[in-house]
Image (spheres, rainbow, N blue to C red):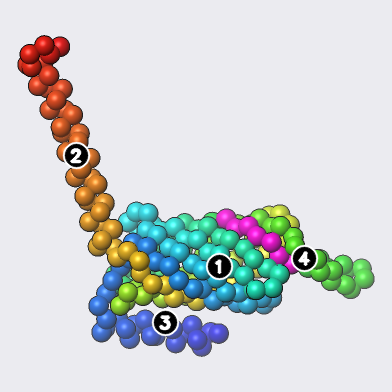
Amino acid sequence: MQKFIIGFILLFFGFSGISLGQSYGSALGLRLANNNQHRMIGLTAKKRIQKGLTAEGILQSDLNVNTSFHALIQKHRPLLTKRLNYYYGAGLSFGIGENREKIPERMEIIRTYGNTHVGVDLIAGLEFTALGLNFSVDYKPNANLIGRQPWYSGQVGISVRTVLVKGKQQNRKRRKREREKRREAGSTLLQKITKPFKPGGK
């Protein structure tokens, strides 16, 4: 896994010299994840909510007994080029899954299934956007608050997303909304100023 991650990062730098760099407003794709207990596959959706800040939703499952949803807010910062970013953040998670309770006195592990759990996530990662695709690798530790043992687990994830809305498109829409708001505000102010001078105005 470590060799794969190093190769993935080197691939980022190799692409950055030849690609048509694209930022994104929103992106949707697949995430593969692994820890010392489960391999997971899931959907990941990311949306930029303001400059340098994104929201991500992850729905993942091992296609057996563990399914969870994770809602995260992430801060992004450029690394060498605007196409390559590192990010960090936090969020909440909930799901249904396996519980492994250790009984040291009897040297046993009792497994139960269908347990509802709620936890807190941290996340740190590296991402690259090019040719309409967004690639990322991350580490996401989770601390369980309710319903699962062990209480802590860490997860390495690799995601590939297709860009649904480019950053430039999102910026144009945002600027258009801001112009419309300014025009509406200016029109309202002008109406207030000219109203007393109109026939019958007060």
Going from the N terminus, do you reach mark 4 or mark 2 first? 4
Going from the N terminus, do you reach mark 2 or mark 3 first? 3
Query: How far, Cα to Cα, is label 1 from label 4?
Result: 23 Å
Callouts 1 and 2 close, C-beta under 8 Å: no
Say which residue label 4 marks: 113
Query: How far, Cα to Cα, is label 3 from label 4?
Result: 37 Å
Q: Is residue 139 left or right of residue 10?
A: right
Dot 1 surroundings within 10 Å: few (below 14), some, or many (20 or more)? many
Chain part drawn in magenta: 92-99
Instruction: Identify which amino acid the numbered label 2 is placed on.
Output: Arg
Going from the N terminus, do you reach mark 1 or mark 2 first? 1
Instruction: Identify which amino acid the numbered label 3 is placed on.
Output: Ile
Say which residue label 3 marks: 9
Instruction: Identify which amino acid the numbered label 1 is placed on.
Output: Lys
Say which residue label 1 marks: 140
Q: Quadrant of the N terminus?
A: bottom right
Residue 55's tag is none
Instruction: Identify which amino acid the numbered label 4 is placed on.
Output: Tyr
Of residues 28 and 19, the one nearer the viewer is 28
Q: Residue 111, can we see it?
A: yes
Please say if 45 is above or below 84: above
Query: How far, Cα to Cα, is label 1 from label 2?
Result: 42 Å
Foreground tag (1 vs 4)? 4
| Residue 103 x %, y % | 87, 67
Q: Quadrant of the C terminus?
A: top left
Foreground tag (1 vs 2)? 2
Please say if 102 is above or below 91: below
Query: How far, Cα to Cα, is label 2 from label 3?
Result: 44 Å
Q: Is residue 55 left or right of residue 198?
A: right
Going from the N terminus, do you reach mark 3 or mark 1 first? 3
Residue 182's tag is 2
